[in-house]
Image: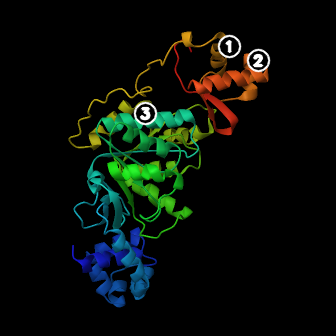
Amino acid sequence: MTDAALESWLCMARLKGVGPQASNRILEAYGDPDRYLAASEADRAARGLPKAAVTAPRDRAAVADGIAADRRWAEAADCHIITRDDPRYPPALARIGDPPPVLFVRGDADVLVQPQIAVVGARHASESGRRTAEAFAAHLAAAGLTITSGLALGIDTAAHEGALAVGGATVAVMATGPDRVYPRDNHPLAHSIGQHGAIVTEMPVGTPVTRGLFPRRNRLIAGLSVGTVVIEAGRNSGALGTAYRAIDSGREAMAVPGSIHNPVAKGCHALIRAGARLVESADQVIEEIRAAVEGFTPQTPAPMAGGNDDTEHPESDWAALDEEEIAVLEAMGHDPIAFETLLRRASLTPDILSSILLKLELSGDIAPSSGGYYMRTSNRAGG
């Protein structure tokens, strides 16, 4: 692509009032942004473009500095600007109703055209949810799928880490400019993803964190992927928006069920009621999306250290625990439980129960859950 052509793409992407839908109409009308920018306002209007898109090129000078910043960012060896007419543009993303005209990619741009599965969910996930996301992602990545998520804390982070743990590829989609990482706590993770996958955004250099941009980010996650798996999500979770966008784009939407008492399982249950597939293992995910990936033959992943989401392998048996610890685990059951409720069930004093819970947490058998609850994380035989 010539410098002038790239300049036109970057200009269109930055013009005020020219979002993805307007860009799509511009490309349908003119074929490329250069012809759009060179046209008269009368011609743009005659072609039925939205009013904002008709007049937006008046402000070309106002975006010149931004375009220069985009081009400086792309000078790094691992930074790429991919436009709609670039052969590296992901075909899956091009098929959604409002594909972005420009992508900013850091890392290996080739992973964007590989079969991807989105794994998303709650930021304030339970320990059990994070473990499930990591195990699912590890299994799917080892089977040959690229794991795509949003770099958020909670389920997204666990999904990226699960893929990296088995040497798989993962894609992080951001709502900010490519020169920023949000949340800041995930800077080290973003660096690893850039080395073993790709970080992608449609927002140009300098775009700050803005709440309204996350739905746009979520449509890219769904659009890049052949299917979306939701693991823990509240009723108003952005992960649900990702799943619904997948459905709208004709992709598979899947949800992992949880306890009826777990508030971050409510969104998954709502998705299942709305028609999403209920999945309990990564192998079920593979079966759901196999037909959508031409020529895909799953590799056989090795069991993941610390447990596998697809089979019931007890981590150990009751012999490793004393009688009081066994009694507390039995009293907990498999749903999140409040300290006061467990106190009544186990018939212990608060100080003794606190001591037992600490031991079980240190051994990895339980973990604190949201809202001051506790939840079992192991699957010991006998329980």
Residue drawn 56% across the image and 40% down it: 125
Q: Earlier in the sequence, mark 2 or mark 3?
A: 3
Residue 238 percent coordinates (x, y)? 53, 52
Q: How much space separates mark 1 and mark 2, taking CA atoms?
A: 9 Å
Q: CA distance from mark 3 to mark 1?
A: 30 Å
Residue 324, numbered label: 1
Residue 380 shows up from this direction: yes
Residue at label 2?
A: 348
Label 2 near label 1: C-beta < 8 Å? yes
Question: What's the residue type where badge 3 is placed?
Answer: Ala
Q: Amino acid at mark 1?
A: Glu
Q: Quadrant of residue 270?
A: top right
Q: Is residue 288 visible?
A: no
| Helix, strand or loop for disc 2 | loop
The amino acid marked with disc number 2 is Leu
Q: Quadrant of residue 310?
A: top left
Reading the image, the residue beneath label 3 is 135
**Among the two numbered marks 1 and 2 on one chain, the one whose residue lies closer to the N terminus:** 1
Task: Give the mark nearer the N terminus: 3 vs 1.
Answer: 3
Helix, strand or loop status at disc 1: helix
Residue at 37% over, 61% down? 97
Front residue (pair 347, 42): 347
Q: Quadrant of the C terminus?
A: top right
